[in-house]
């Protein structure tokens, strides 16, 4: 009886959601007909007429809106992928330092987390872009020669040039998300029984080796769900890159909507693009979580 009631409740919720969606779609269609716009994606094949400051693929103003949106999406993927890696490394290091036996290291990690999490991400992006990077000299001879240079034009590492906009977005997202990941890692480490910490210390293992070999593997099931949420937040927060002129998907979409007046179609494409990206991140993290759980059950 209880199972039947639960099934009927779920069915009622689905019917209600479908009804609301149908009403919204109907109102959208009626309003489009009244304004004489209709729903059309033919503008995607027209030339954009605007340049992009950064593009991983060949691009010129004569290319179509569809190609410009693809270039913007790749720019978003580039900064999001690099940000996920950098934020994970920074977060794991800071989270592990929160439980270090070194009081100085523990205090510095706590200060980093408490300060960064209180400052809005947009202000941090402005700091990295206008203060930290644009404030650098135009030429800065480095003792490392061609291996690494840092100027107000960006960063060059092993001959690979990173624009100042990309660098600012990458630093802002990594530092901001890394602080939240540090708290997730700290919570995961706290879930491991204290006896495990005492066990590896009694065996004479160093803190670093004990964390890597004993504590972190046991903390992973508690860390991964929170880590997945922070990854999704980083992907969504990347849209703030428009504030400092980085040519990501949101920036290209905004410019396209302004020029064509096709706001509904533009936002639909934007929503679908980020939905696909977030589903991809979430799917990968779920697979990783299942693999960790199965490995823990076998051991």
Image (tube, rainbow, N blue to C red):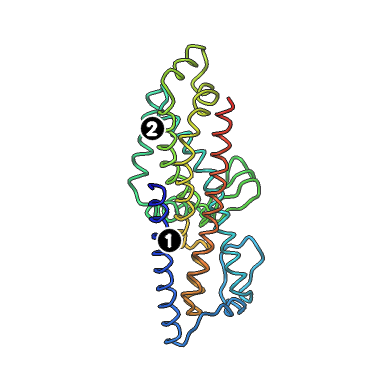
Quadrant of the image for the C terminus? top right
Crowd tier of the residue under label 1, counting other residues whose Cα lies within 10 Å: few below 14, some 14–19, many 20 or above: few
Q: How many marks?
A: 2
User: Residue 244, how many percent across, how many down?
Assistant: 45, 60
- Quarter-wise, where is residue 12 in the image? bottom left
Nearer-the-camera pick, 161 or 289: 289
Crowd tier of the residue under label 2, counting other residues whose Cα lies within 10 Å: few below 14, some 14–19, many 20 or above: some
User: Residue 227, how many percent across, how many down?
Assistant: 47, 42
Please name the residue shown 56% across and 77% down the image.
41
Q: Is residue 184 left or right of residue 48?
A: left
Nearer-the-camera pick, 161 or 30: 30
Q: Is residue 95 above or below residue 247?
A: above
User: Residue 47, how many percent across, how many down?
Assistant: 61, 78
- Residue 108 badge: 2
Nearer-the-camera pick, 50 or 68: 68
- Quarter-wise, where is residue 54 in the image? bottom right
Q: Indicate the secondary structure of the residue bearing disc 2.
A: helix
Please name the residue shown 47% across and 15% down the image.
199
Q: Indicate the secondary structure of the residue bearing disc 1.
A: helix
Please name the residue shown 48% across and 69% down the image.
267
Nearer-N-terminus badge (1/2): 1
Q: Is residue 231 above or below residue 224?
A: below
User: Residue 158, how many percent across, how many down?
Assistant: 65, 45
Q: Nearer the viewer, mark 1 or mark 2?
A: 1
Q: Is residue 202 above or below residue 55?
A: above
Q: Are marks 1 and 2 in contact (CB under 8 Å)?
A: no
Q: Is residue 294 left or right of residue 30?
A: right
Check disc 1 and report the residue beneath it.
14
Q: Is residue 209 above or below residue 170?
A: above
The residue at the far front in this view is 1
Nearer-the-camera pick, 98 or 297: 297
Q: How far is disc 1 from disc 2 in space, using C-alphas?
A: 49 Å
């Amino acid at each position: 009886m209880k199972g039947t009631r639960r099934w009927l409740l779920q069915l009622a919720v689905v019917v209600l959601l479908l009804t609301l969606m149908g009403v919204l779609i109907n109102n959208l269609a009626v309003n489009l007909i009244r304004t004489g716009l209709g729903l059309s994606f033919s503008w995607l094949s027209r030339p954009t007429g605007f340049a992009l400051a950064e593009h991983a693929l060949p691009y010129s103003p004569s290319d179509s809106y569809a190609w410009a949106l693809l270039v913007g999406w790749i720019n978003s993927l580039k900064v999001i992928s690099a940000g996920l890696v950098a934020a994970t490394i920074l977060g794991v290091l800071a989270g592990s330092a929160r439980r270090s036996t070194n009081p100085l290291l523990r205090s510095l990690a706590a200060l980093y987390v408490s300060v960064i999490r209180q400052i809005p991400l947009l202000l941090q992006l402005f700091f990295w872009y206008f203060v930290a990077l644009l404030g650098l000299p135009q030429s800065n001879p480095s003792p490392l020669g061609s291996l690494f240079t840092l100027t107000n034009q960006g960063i060059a590492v092993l001959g690979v040039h990173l624009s100042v906009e990309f660098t600012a977005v990458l630093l802002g997202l990594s530092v901001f998300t890394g602080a939240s990941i540090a708290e997730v890692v700290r919570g995961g480490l706290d879930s491991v029984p204290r006896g495990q910490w005492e066990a590896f210390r009694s065996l004479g293992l160093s803190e670093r080796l004990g964390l890597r070999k004993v504590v972190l593997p046991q903390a992973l099931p508690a860390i991964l769900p929170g880590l997945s949420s922070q990854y999704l937040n980083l992907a969504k927060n990347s849209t703030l890159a428009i504030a400092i002129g980085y040519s990501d998907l949101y920036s290209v979409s905004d410019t396209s909507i302004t020029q064509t007046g096709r706001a509904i179609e533009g936002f639909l494409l934007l929503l679908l693009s980020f939905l696909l990206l977030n589903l991809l991140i979430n799917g990968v993290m779920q697979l990783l979580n299942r693999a960790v759980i199965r490995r823990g059950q076998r051991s």
